[in-house]
Image (spheres, rainbow, N blue to C red):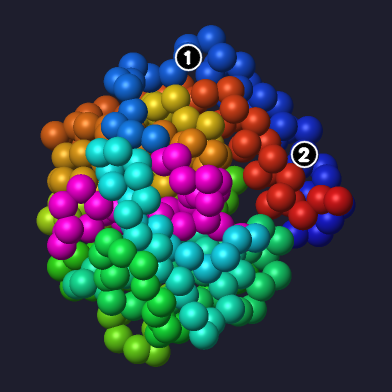
C-alpha cells in the first residue's frame, strides 16, 4: 500500500480500535476461574506458543519469541514448573512464534515478521524431546509465501498432517496450506481467519479449530474455517498461545513474566457468534499491532 494511503487510513482505524477498547473497559472480562498454573521460570518472559504432549501426561512445550536463546521448554501443566529444556543447535532462529506437535514430531514456526521484510522464514522439526535437558539439530524447512507477512499461528491437521499458517492481520487474515510432503509448498487458500490471530490449533480428533487473538478465542469449522463461536479471553496480559488439552478444552497463555495458563471449555455445538469483550490491555496491544502492520516510524 502507498505510504500516503496508509497514513490516510490511520484516523478511522484508530477510532475503531479505541471504540473496541472502550467497550472492553465497560463490559469487562469473561468469567474465568483461577488459572491452572503459572509459568514461573524467569527465563520464560515472552511465551509465544503452546503444544500439549500426547505422549507425556501433564506436559506442554513453550518457547520465547525474538531476542532469546533458541530453547524449547517442557512445562508441567498442573504446576507451571519447567521440567526440561531443549536447545536447538545448528540453526539460526530469528523470531519463533508458534509450536505444534504431530506424529511424535515437534514443529517450531520461525515465522515472525512484524515489518514484513524477511525472506528466511522457516519451520523447524525434531522428535518430541519429553522431560529432561536435550540438544537437538532440527530439520529446517524453508517457507515461501506469496506475500511477506507476520505469521504467529501454526496448525497441523491431525488426520492427514497438512500444515496451515495464519497471518496476523488487522483485517481478515490469510490462510496458507501445505501438504505433509517435503519440500513444503505453501499455497494461499480461499479460507479466511479473524484479525490479529496470535496462535491456534486443531482439536486432537480434528473436529474443530481454535484460534486466539487479542480480542478473543474463536472456534472454527475444521473444513470451511467458518467461525462457530467467539469467546471472551480470560484475564491475560497479552494472549499469545493456545493448545488443545482435549477436544473440548484449550489451554491459553500469555506473554510476560509469571504468565498464567487458563483452561477454557469450548462450546459442544455451534452457537450464534456473539460480540465478545476484550480486556483493555489487549485493545492497546491491537493499536500497537496496527502501527507495526502499517510500518510507521
Q: Horizontal placement of 118 versus 102: left or right?
A: right
* Foreground label between 1 and 2: 1
Q: Does residue 292 show up?
A: yes
* Residue 70 x/y as whole percent: 52, 68
C-beta proximity under 8 Å, tags 1 and 2: no
* Residue furthest bottom as drawn: 183
Q: Quadrant of the N terminus?
A: bottom right
Q: Residue at x 34, y 78 (%)?
A: 126
Of residues 11 and 80, the one drawn nearer to the viewer in this rendering: 80
Q: Residue at x 49, y 36 (%)?
A: 258
Q: CA distance from mark 1 to mark 2?
A: 26 Å
The residue at 49%/80% (across/down) is 89
Neighbor class of circle 2 (other Cα within 10 Å; few <14, some 14-19, many 20+) is some
Mark nearer the N terminus (1 vs 2) = 2
Above or below: residue 143 compared with residue 159? below
> x, y percentage for residue 152?
50, 57
Give 133 or 151, whichever is nearer the viewer: 133
Q: Which residues are magenta?
A: 39-66
Tell me the residue that label 1 is attached to. Answer: 28
Residue beneath disc 2: 10
Amino acid at each position: 500500500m502507498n505510504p500516503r494511503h496508509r497514513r490516510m487510513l490511520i484516523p478511522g482505524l484508530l477510532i475503531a480500535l479505541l471504540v473496541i477498547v472502550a467497550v472492553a473497559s465497560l463490559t469487562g472480562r469473561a468469567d474465568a476461574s483461577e488459572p491452572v498454573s503459572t509459568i514461573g521460570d524467569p527465563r520464560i518472559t515472552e511465551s509465544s506458543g503452546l503444544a500439549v504432549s500426547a505422549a507425556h501426561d501433564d506436559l506442554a512445550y513453550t518457547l520465547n519469541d525474538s531476542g532469546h536463546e533458541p530453547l524449547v521448554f517442557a512445562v508441567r501443566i498442573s504446576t507451571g514448573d519447567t521440567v526440561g529444556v531443549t536447545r536447538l543447535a545448528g540453526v539460526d532462529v530469528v523470531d519463533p512464534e508458534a509450536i505444534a506437535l504431530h506424529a511424535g514430531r515437534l514443529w517450531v514456526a520461525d515465522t515472525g515478521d512484524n515489518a514484513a521484510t524477511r525472506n528466511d522464514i522457516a519451520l523447524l522439526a525434531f522428535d518430541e524431546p519429553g522431560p529432561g535437558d536435550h540438544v537437538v539439530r532440527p530439520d529446517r524447512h524453508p517457507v515461501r509465501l506469496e506475500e511477506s507477512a507476520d505469521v504467529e499461528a501454526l496448525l497441523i491437521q491431525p488426520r492427514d498432517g497438512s500444515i496451515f499458517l495464519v497471518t496476523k492481520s488487522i483485517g481478515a487474515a490469510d490462510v496458507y496450506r501445505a501438504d505433509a510432503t517435503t519440500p513444503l509448498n505453501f499455497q494461499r487458500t480461499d479460507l479466511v481467519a479473524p484479525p490479529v490471530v496470535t496462535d491456534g490449533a486443531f482439536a486432537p480428533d480434528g473436529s474443530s479449530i481454535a484460534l486466539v487473538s487479542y480480542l478473543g478465542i474463536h472456534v472454527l469449522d475444521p473444513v470451511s474455517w467458518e467461525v462457530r463461536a467467539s469467546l471472551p479471553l480470560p484475564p491475560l496480559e497479552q494472549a499469545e498461545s493456545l493448545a488443545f488439552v482435549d477436544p473440548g478444552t484449550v489451554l491459553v497463555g500469555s506473554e510476560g513474566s509469571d504468565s498464567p495458563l487458563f483452561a477454557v471449555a469450548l462450546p459442544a455445538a455451534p452457537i450464534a457468534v456473539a460480540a465478545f469483550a476484550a480486556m483493555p490491555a489487549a485493545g492497546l496491544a491491537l493499536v500497537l499491532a496496527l502501527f507495526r502492520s502499517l510500518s510507521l516510524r
